C-alpha cells in the first residue's frame, strides 16, 4: 500500500533538498568512523550528544557530524540522487515503516535483539530508542477547586471550560482519547473507529486550539492561551519548566516510541546499526532518560533506578500507578496515516 499523504510530505521541498544532499562529505572524504546524525536540533539534540554520542565516541572512536532538522523530504532527495549522507535520523517511525527498504534501511544486525523491547514497538526498519507518552495535563491555576481527574474531563467543556491545545496532527493521542471518553475499552480501541472518534471531537471542536509544532504548544501554554493540553512527555516537562503550572492527569494515556532510523544508502550502515544497539543499552538509556524525562526502551532497564527529578516524575507515564496505558498501534498507523490525515484536514475546516 502506498501512502500518498506521506509521499506529498516527502516530495515537498525535495528539489531544494536534493541540492543540499549533493553537498557535504562525499564517501571518499568521510572518515571510516564518522556518523552523520540528523535530529531535531536545540536542547533535545544536545541531550543526544551528551548521553548517546559521546559515550559511543569514547568506546569506539567514532565521531559524529550533527545536522538538523531531520526532514523526510531530505531523505527522499538524498536517496533519489544516490547521494545519501545521513547515517542516523531521529524522526517518526511512520516514515520508516511506510518506506521500509525503499527509503530506509532494514535493520539486520543481530545485536538489535527485538525481544528486548516491548511488544508492538519494533519493525524491520526500526527499534525504539526511548519511550514517551501523549500526556493529558491542565493548568492548575484554572481549576483550583475542581481539577480534572479523568480523560473524560478533557471532553467536558461544561464542567471544565477553557481552550484545549492539541498538536495539529492526528497521531497525538487525541483520537484514542476521544474513543475512551466515549466508552470504548482500551483493548477495543484499535482499529480506530474514525467516525465515532470524530463525532466525539465534534463536541469540543470549538474549544480546540491547533498548534503547528511542539514549540507552539509550549508557547501557547506559557501564554495562557489554553487550559488543557495533550502533548508529549518531554514537551510537557519543558513547558512546566518555562512557567506553566501544569499538572498531569493519570487516567488513560497513549504511549509511543522515539526511533533512530537509517536512510537508504547510508555509507556506514553497519556502524550505524551498532550505534543504535549501543544507545539502547542500559547505561546510555538511563543517561538519556535522566536528561529528557523520557523512559528507556528496553524492558530490562529498571525505571526505578533512574534519577528523575520530581518534575520529570510528575509527567512520566511509565512509573507505577499511572492509570491505563495503551501503546499506539504501529502497523495500524503505518497503514492508515494517509486516510487519517486526510480525514483530519477535512474535519478541521468543515
Image (cartoon, rainbow, N blue to C red):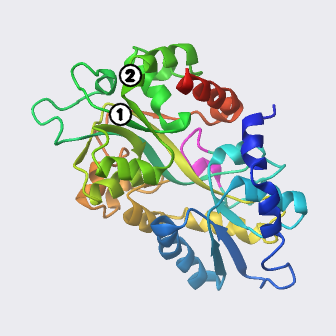
Q: Which of these two is toward me, 5 or 36? A: 5
| Residue at image mark 2 | 204
Q: Is residue 343 above or below residue 311?
A: above
Q: Report x, y in % for residue 44.
A: 48, 65
Q: Which quadrant of the figure contains the N terminus?
A: top right
Q: Residue at x 53, y 71 (%)?
A: 52
Q: Nearer the viewer, residue 151 or 349?
A: 349
Looking at the rendered structure, the secondary structure element under dot 2 is loop
Any magenta on residue 114? yes
Quadrant assignment for the C terminus:
top right
Q: Is the residue under label 2 in contact with that under label 1 (CB below 8 Å)?
A: yes
Residue 338 placed where, x, y %? 70, 31
Percent position of residue 318, x then y:
38, 46
Q: Residue at x 78, y 61 (%)?
A: 16
Is 83 above or below relative to 301?
below
Mark 1 residue element:
strand
Q: What is the crowding at mark 2: few (fewer than 14 residues within 10 Å), some, or many (at least 20)?
A: some
Amino acid at each position: 500500500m502506498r501512502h500518498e499523504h506521506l509521499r506529498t510530505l516527502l516530495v515537498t521541498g525535495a528539489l531544494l533538498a536534493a541540492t543540499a544532499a549533493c553537498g557535504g562529505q562525499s564517501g571518499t572524504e568521510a572518515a571510516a568512523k564518522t556518523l552523520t546524525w540528523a535530529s531535531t536540533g536545540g536542547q533535545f539534540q544536545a541531550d543526544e550528544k551528551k548521553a548517546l554520542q559521546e559515550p559511543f565516541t569514547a568506546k569506539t572512536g567514532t565521531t559524529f557530524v550533527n545536522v538538523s532538522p531531520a526532514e523526510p523530504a531530505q531523505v527522499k532527495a538524498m536517496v533519489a540522487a544516490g547521494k545519501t549522507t545521513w547515517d542516523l535520523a531521529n524522526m517518526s517511525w511512520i516514515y520508516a515503516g511506510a518506506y521500509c527498504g525503499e527509503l530506509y534501511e532494514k535493520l539486520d544486525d543481530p545485536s538489535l535483539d527485538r525481544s528486548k523491547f516491548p511488544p508492538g514497538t519494533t519493525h524491520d526498519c526500526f527499534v525504539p530508542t526511548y519511550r514517551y507518552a501523549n500526556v493529558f495535563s491542565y493548568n492548575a491555576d484554572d481549576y483550583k477547586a475542581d481539577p480534572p481527574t479523568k480523560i473524560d474531563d478533557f471532553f467536558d467543556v461544561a464542567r471544565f471550560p477553557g481552550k484545549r491545545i492539541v498538536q495539529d496532527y492526528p497521531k497525538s493521542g487525541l483520537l484514542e482519547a476521544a474513543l475512551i471518553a466515549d466508552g470504548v475499552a482500551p483493548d477495543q480501541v484499535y482499529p480506530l473507529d474514525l467516525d465515532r472518534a470524530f463525532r466525539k471531537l465534534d463536541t469540543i471542536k470549538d474549544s480546540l486550539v491547533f498548534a503547528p509544532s511542539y514549540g507552539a504548544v509550549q508557547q501557547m501554554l506559557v501564554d495562557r492561551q489554553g487550559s488543557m493540553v495533550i502533548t508529549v512527555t518531554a514537551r510537557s516537562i519543558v513547558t512546566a519548566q518555562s512557567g506553566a503550572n501544569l499538572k498531569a492527569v493519570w487516567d488513560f494515556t497513549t504511549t509511543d516510541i522515539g526511533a533512530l532510523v537509517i536512510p537508504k544508502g547510508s555509507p556506514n550502515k553497519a556502524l550505524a546499526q551498532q550505534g543504535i544497539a549501543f544507545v539502547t543499552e542500559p547505561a546510555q538509556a538511563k543517561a538519556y532518560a535522566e536528561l529528557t524525562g523520557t523512559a528507556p526502551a528496553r524492558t530490562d532497564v529498571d525505571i526505578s533506578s533512574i534519577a528523575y527529578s520530581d518534575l520529570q516524575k510528575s509527567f512520566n507515564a511509565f512509573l507505577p500507578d499511572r492509570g491505563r496505558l495503551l501503546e499506539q498501534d504501529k502497523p495500524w498507523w503505518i497503514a492508515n496515516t494517509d486516510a487519517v490525515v486526510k480525514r483530519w484536514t477535512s474535519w478541521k475546516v468543515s
